[in-house]
Image (tube, rainbow, N blue to C red):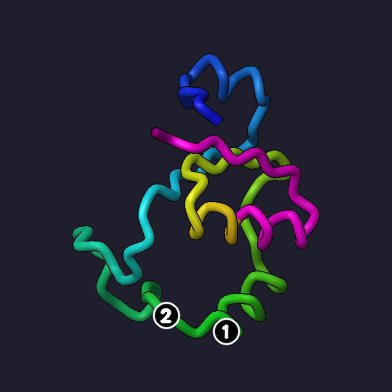
Amino acid sequence: MNTAATPELLRELGADEVIVAICAIRGMPAIPGNVGAATGATADLDLVRRATHAWMPIGDKVVIIGGELVGVELAEFLMERGRQVTVVDVP
């Protein structure tokens, strides 16, 4: 805690992926092109769990920026699937 998530720190951690999880607002952001059959948002956690057991394009070492509920839940989720996870909280 009380550590800035600087590029140097992230390089030092050797992460394959960096995930920024700094808020708990659920929904689909207004991003051009995010409408269609290949995109979507869901509150159905069971559906997400089933899908990610079959397909998860995330590296073995993951840094999650944001130590609030969403970031910690995501860390637990990824650790249960064999990922090495570091959570960096932001002030």
* Residue that appears at 54% across and 35% down: 88
Residue 55 appears in which quarter of the rendering? bottom right
Q: Which residue is mark 1?
A: 47
7 is within the stretch colored magenta:
no
* Residue that appears at 25% across and 73% down: 35
- Magenta segment, which residues? 75-91
In the rendered image, the vertical position of residue 81 relative to residue 28, given as above or below: above
Residue 89's x, y, as percent? Answer: 50, 37
Mark found first going from the N terminus, 2 or 1:
2
Q: Nearer the viewer, residue 36 or 16?
A: 16
Residue 73 appears in which quarter of the rendering? bottom right
Amino acid carrying label 2: it is: Thr
Amino acid carrying label 1: it is: Leu
82 is within the stretch colored magenta:
yes
Residue sticking out furthest to the right: 82
Instruction: Determine whether, in the image, residue 21 is placed left or right of residue 88.
Output: left
Q: Which residue is mark 2?
A: 42
* Residue that appears at 64% across and 76% down: 49
Looking at the image, do the residues carrying marks 2 and 1 touch, with CB atoms under 8 Å apart? Answer: yes
Q: Nearer the viewer, residue 23 or 33?
A: 23
Quadrant of the drawing holding the N terminus: top right
Q: Nearer the viewer, residue 49 or 51?
A: 49
Could you tell me how far apart the alpha carbons at marks 2 and 1 are, in whole angstroms? 8 Å
Residue 13's x, y, as percent? Answer: 66, 25
Instruction: Determine whether, in the image, residue 3 is placed left or right of residue 83.
Output: left
In the rendered image, the vertical position of residue 10 relative to residue 64, given as above or below: above
